[in-house]
Amino acid sequence: MPKVAVVTGGTRGIGYAISIALKDRGFRVAANYAGNDNAAQQFQAETGIPVYRWDVGDYEACATGLKRVASDLGPIDVVVNNAGITKDAMLHKMTPEMWNEVIRIDLGSMFNMTQPVIEGMRNRNWGRIINITSINGQKGQMGQTNYSAAKAGVIGFTKALAMETAKKGVTVNCVAPGYIDTEMVQAVPEKVLESIVAQIPVGRLGTCTEIARCVTFLASDEAGFITGSTLTANGGQYIAG
Ligand code: NDP
């Protein structure tokens, strides 16, 4: 029986590459997204992967969406918590809305997407939770107190849940990308991009495929002894202990 994987934010950017990579390795994949129907339809046409629209910041929407995926594809074996947003400002200029929305989506989604599936994984004695954090959750970043706090919270969530589920064959890990060649990064002015790349020892941006490779590794049976860890993929920009 092929295993079933749900990828949040699986229709664009890094999530797009993760969805395809899991499909290529034999998983039955469901790709979730927030509201960009055009991108989702294009993704579905290109990949044949079914798409599901719901807000990962909303617990009830996640519980309902996950039930739909399970009834369409089968019990959920892998959750990749990839969806994330930024709303940047220095703290003295940050509004409560900017703070709350980033915490709700980037950190709240960990609970919302994982709590409804974890009991089933425990009962079946196999599961993989893979959470996409960020270099900026590890080292902090000016203008991103909300995002850095949420992404650091993702790492804490991962460690605690890893302890809870280790005996049940369920591993819980993070992938922490550095600067990746996504649409968002491509939109940065050339001079700024040059200064970013200058801080990356390998001398280039990462690719979405390189992050997807980290995820497929952690999703595999061979990664069963790895849990509670953060797989850092940032070209040496920040070497965390
Ligand atoms: P993109 O902005 O390219 O894609 C975001 C995806 O997430 C889209 O599919 C979007 O759906 C979905 N999404 C956003 N909000 C929600 C929501 N509330 N509910 C459901 N889906 C949602 O993101 P990236 O590929 O750049 O980033 C992916 C992850 O990697 C994020 O967690 C990000 O923080 C992290 N990361 C990215 C880095 C980078 O260099 N890009 C570096 C380090 C970490 P829709 O299309 O409908 O809007």
Image: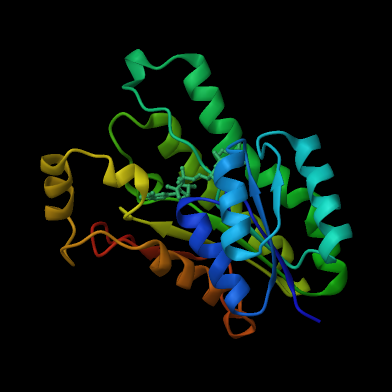
Instruction: Reply above or below: 10 against 47.
Output: above
Q: Residue 158 appears in which quarter of the rendering?
A: bottom right
At horizontal 56% and vertical 56% (from top left) the residue drawn is 131
Q: In the image, residue 208 lies at what x, y percent?
A: 40, 61
Q: Does the image show residue 6?
A: yes
Question: Which residue sits furthest bottom?
Answer: 222
Q: Residue 221 appears in which quarter of the rendering?
A: bottom right
The colour mode here is rainbow
At horizontal 72% and vertical 33% (from top left) the residue drawn is 58
Q: Does the image show residue 159?
A: no
Q: In the image, residue 154 lies at what x, y percent?
A: 54, 48
At horizontal 62% and vertical 49% (from top left) the residue drawn is 41
Instruction: Reply above or below: 18 against 108.
Output: below
Instruction: Reply above or below: 239 against 226.
Output: above
Q: Nearer the viewer, residue 235 or 8?
A: 8
Q: Quadrant of the N terminus?
A: bottom right
Q: In the image, residue 165 lies at what x, y percent?
A: 73, 65
Q: How many numbered marks are there?
A: 0
Q: In the image, residue 192 lies at what x, y percent?
A: 15, 40
Q: Is residue 132 left or right of residue 73?
A: left
At horizontal 12% and vertical 46% (from top left) the residue drawn is 195
Q: Nearer the viewer, residue 57 or 237?
A: 57
Q: Nearer the viewer, residue 161 or 33?
A: 33
Q: Quadrant of the C terminus?
A: bottom left
